[in-house]
Amino acid sequence: MQELISQYLHQYNEFKHWSPSHLAALFVSLSCIVLIPLYSKHYLNEKAQYKLGAAIGILIACSLLAWNLLVAASGNYSLQKDLPLQLCRFANLTVVLVMVWRKQWWFELLYFWALAGMLQASITPDLKEDYPHFLYFRYWIGHTGMILALVYAAVVYQMRPQFKHVLKAMVGINVFMLFAALVNVLIGANYFWICNKPPTASILDYLGPWPWYIFFAEFVALANFSLAYLPWLLVDYIQKKQSNTE
């Protein structure tokens, strides 16, 4: 069984950026991100809304756990590669705090972390396995599924960030990076791409060599977090304009 699982995990068609499977994933993801929160808000009662939101969060977390179980069952689990110390994996595990327990304070962190990181990960996926491999589905559930979860929390649960939470997100991500860096030193890993850039194309390729790309990535993160708040500025502007006309 171990050998069969290992063969399955390592035998796949190579994923290519902007291939039909990439475009299909983006189309399905965008459709879900738009339609599911709107449907829930307008057609489900409060109890059903909560059940659907909780299911989204649990699905995301379970997709990561299932991947870890498969890797462990294959005999290839590695402390250097498979701990939840990439930001997206950590977010996948903790999104249940928002979707199941509706913790506003955690939403304020994940909103900025996820929208910044997951959008980039959707455009330039760090993905090797193409459709219909399990890890293809796991990747999109773990990335664009996070965007769906946070949009759902905002639209249905009526959670929202404040601009001051950009600073909170910056502090949080740096604390996470320092912890990941400590683990990297202790076990010889490269979590959060602190020691080297990812093997596939990413925005870090444009930020210079190590360690400069880490420094410049701080400014990219700050810019992305600020951009993630723009929709709320628009919402506030529309609401203020409507109140002034009444």
Image (cartoon, rainbow, N blue to C red):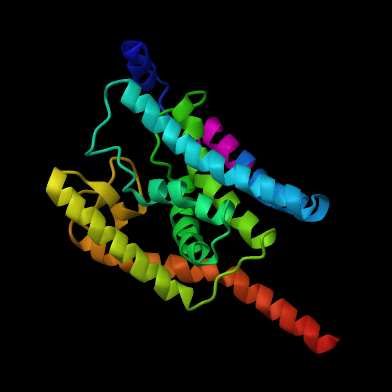
Q: Residue at x 22, y 39 (%)?
A: 80
Is 217 left, or right, of 32 in this rendering?
left
Position in image of residue 182 (x %, y %): 18, 55
What type of secondary structure mainly makes up the magenta span? helix
Q: Is residue 16 visible?
A: no
Q: Measuring from the top left, give residue 51's x and y in whole percent.
A: 68, 46
Q: Is residue 59 magenta?
A: no
Q: Residue at x 50, y 58 (%)?
A: 115
Observer able to see residue 230 = yes
Left/right of residue 156 with respect to residue 100 in the rendered view: right
Whole-percent x, y for residue 245 in the image:
84, 87
Most foreground residue, 148 or 64: 64
User: Where is 145 relative to 107, above or below?
Assistant: above
Q: 184 or 224, which is in the foreground?
A: 184
231 with respect to 181 (left or right): right
Q: Nearer the viewer, residue 101 or 192?
A: 101
Q: Which residue is outermost to the right? A: 246
In this rendered view, identify the residue nearer to me: 107 or 211: 107
Residue 14 lies, with reference to residue 167, above or below; the image says: above
**Which region is colored magenta?**
16-27
